[in-house]
Image (cartoon, rainbow, N blue to C red):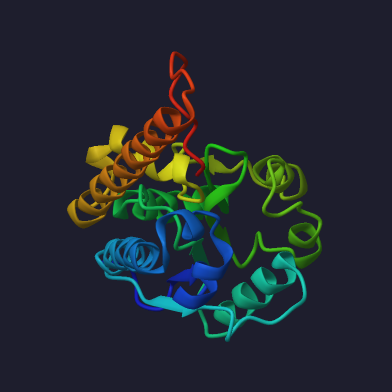
Amino acid sequence: MYQERTTAIILFARSLQAELRHRSYTKSLGKRLSQRLISTSHEAVVSDLKSTGLPVLSYDESLQRGSTFGQRLCHVIEDTLRLGYDQVVVVGGDCPTLSASDITIAIDMLSEHGLALGPDDRGGMYLLGITAQTYCRASLLSVRWQSQYTIEDVQKHLDESPPIILPVRKDMHSLADITGLLRLPSRISADVMTLVNLIVAHLAHRLILKMQSLRVMAIIHGVSLNRGPPALEL
């Protein structure tokens, strides 16, 4: 167990309804299946965070302040540090490959490095660990958040202490990300994997129905089907 009130974990994530509106895969999967996926993934992340034994503070859009991502993030970090914590670890709710060990490694290294970064596979981040001494509002506001330059900018603007870089993890933003989780069974929870398999089966069924419909139309209109399969509109 870590010293009480030294470190806090911040879950910086949208609410379920906001996430449903934001994610591109909602239209393809439908509201019910998308809601199940988002909820199950979120619960798995929260379970991992709580398993560290550290306080977990959740901030969805109803508790965030500011007109930009950087402003909202800075307010959340500052509000948490004002509660008396010496360092914080900020994570989002859209990284089902995050593990409790990622959190503990970041915390263990913060006292030495002052900054811990968890890069995703797009140049963004799934984790930001920072101490009160390293934190700088102006530097964080200079970062191009939610872009392919995020991790690069954080390293450039917060260069007082060389950061510890955690392994690259995969976020879940698109259908391609969801199906890609099939290659990472050891990195995600059993409940999330069950849903991923269900989604893949759902997409395959849609493709079969589309091909069958095209065959029927071809028979009706006398069109040859000697070509590749249709692209599934994701």
In this rendering, is residue 216 above or below 82? above
- Specify whether residue 169 is in view: no
Q: Is residue 161 left or right of residue 103?
A: right
Q: Is residue 33 left or right of residue 132?
A: left
The picture places residue 211, in percent across and down from the top left corner, at: 38, 33
- Specify whether residue 99 is in view: yes
> Total label count?
0
The picture places residue 212, in percent across and down from the top left corner, at: 34, 36
Quarter-of-image position of residue 220: top left
Q: Nearer the viewer, residue 174 or 4?
A: 174
In this rendering, is residue 205 above or below 128? above
In this rendering, is residue 43 above or below 178? below
Q: In which quadrant will I find the N terminus?
A: bottom left
Q: Which residue is painted at 68% across and 73% down in the image? A: 72
The picture places residue 150, in percent across and down from the top left corner, at: 68, 47
The picture places residue 32, in percent across and down from the top left corner, at: 35, 69
Quarter-of-image position of residue 195: bottom left
Q: Which residue is painted at 44% across and 78% down in the image? A: 57
Q: Which residue is painted at 59% across and 79% down in the image? A: 61
